[in-house]
Image (tube, rainbow, N blue to C red):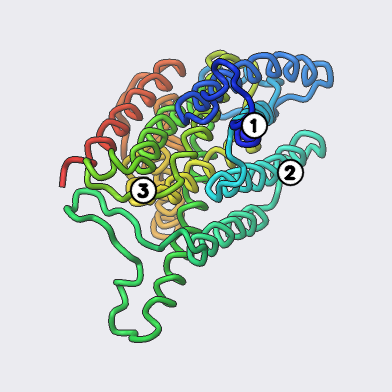
Amino acid sequence: MFYYLYECFKESIDFPGFGLLRYLTFRSLFSIITSLIIALLFGSRLIRFLQRKQIGETIRDLALEGQLAKKGTPTMGGVIIIIALLAPILLFGDLSNMYIQLMIISTLWLGFIGFADDYIKVFKKNKEGLQGRFKIIGQVGLGLIVGLTLCFHPETTTQTTIPFIKGNEFDYAWLWPFTGAYQQTIGRVIYVLAVIFIITAVSNGTNLTDGMDGLAAGVTIVVGVTLGVLAYLSGNIIYATYLNIMYIPNSGELVVFMAALIGALVGFLWYNAYPAQIFMGDTGSLALGGVVAVFAILIRKELLIPILCGIFLVESLSVIMQRYYFKYTKLKYGEGRRIFRMAPLHHHFQKEGIAALINKPHQILPEAKIVTRFWIVAVLLAVITIVTLKIR
């Protein structure tokens, strides 16, 4: 709104400070402040409302330290994040920007899927929530929207960035030189499939990471700050030329979006830090994962996701490894065996007394210590991601 006020009246209004609305940094700063304030104010009211309605988390007894104390804690806190994120975008963002439009669609799309899952769990008392196939269909649908838009929009391309490689611009169509006239078409198909896979993988990885107070929110803040820096550099032709990275016109506007997300997450973390007063639920975790994935795709840094989102990746792999190893050993030995004491990985450090291939550390770690250490690892991965700009 304020951005359009400036565009409409910039020639006729000579008000001190009015011209600041054209600056990306100014709008980003106010975006993060606004989202933080909204999250803090709205969060406390939502928590009280959910407590009055006795809308709380149902906890299974998994013999984890402090687990049963979480029973009844309000959930669906992702609503706080989404509202605090979108309000500043409407105020300070350029809504005509194609990248901003895709980010808003992604947030609402996966937020709605997550909300449906939480609604079924909380209000319908169905612990299974939304059936998995419907989640996958929704994630694939979003992948198609994002992938096809980037393939056919006149301002975009299927080129991306390969880390650690000098002159690192790469087009998916280059993988199929033997297809002749169909090379570009096949390249676009592969690109869309890659987008679908990335969105699905990262959103599910974030969902799996959301198992401890403040874990998913804190890690996503670190990831978000890194992506915001990369978006600013990629959208500025001077910095992009200096660093020899892909210049993406109009992508700098994404910094306003990421600033709003960081402010919303910091505000939410005020209530979600240990001991949590509210959980984000699938409403938040699926939306956050989708936002991170789509953001990385838009700034052509999707191949950096395994490094930057290493926490989400490892959490997902721990579940996959645990499940298939259990099935394999059950068929081979008649009883299922485990790699970790418990999956996802963060619960491995809380569990004691279960035989597994990986039994270190032997002592149970407090939840707050596990979360803090995961944050530290996320910061380290973020630094490595930034360093890739110069290591080629």
Give the image location of residue 221, x and y in percent.
46, 27
Residue 222, picture quadrant: top left
Task: Tell me whether the residue at label 3 lies in contact with that at label 1, contact meaning CB atoms closer than 8 angstroms.
Answer: no
Residue at the spot x=63%, y=25% of the render? 13
Give me the C-alpha separation between circle 3 and circle 1.
36 Å
Q: Is residue 390 above or below residue 53?
A: below
Please state which of the two labelled residues, at mark 3 or mark 1, is closer to the viewer.
1
Using a 10 Å C-alpha cutoff, classify the residue at mark 2 as few (fewer than 14 neighbours), some (14 to 19) or many (20 or more). some
Query: Is residue 49 something that shows in the picture?
Result: yes
Relative to residue 11, is residue 185 drawn left or right? Answer: left
> In this figure, which residue is indicated by the disc labeled 3?
301
Q: Earlier in the sequence, mark 3 or mark 2?
A: 2
The residue lying toward the viewer, choosing from 100 and 334, is: 100
- Work out whether residue 314 or residue 334 is closer to the camera in this orientation and state it: 314
Report x, y in % for residue 134.
Answer: 67, 56
Residue 40 position (above or below residue 151): above
Residue visible at 39% across and 50% down? 248
Residue drawn at point x = 76 percent, y = 34 percent: 122
Q: Which residue is mark 2?
A: 116
For label 1, the residue is 9
* Mark 3 vs 1, N-terminal side: 1
What SS does tag 2 mark?
A: helix
Residue 215: % across, % down: 48, 26
Q: Tag 3, which secondary structure?
A: loop
Instruction: Check disc 1 and give the amino acid type.
Output: Phe
- Residue 224, labelled with which disc? none
The type of residue carrying mark 2 is Ala
Instruction: Report the front residue among 307 and 388.
Output: 388
Rendering coords of residue 94 (x, y %): 58, 39
Q: CA distance from mark 2 to mark 1?
A: 42 Å
The residue at the point 66 percent across, 19 percent down is 38
How dense is the environment of label 1, judged by Cα within 10 Å: few (below 14), some, or many (20 and up)?
Answer: few
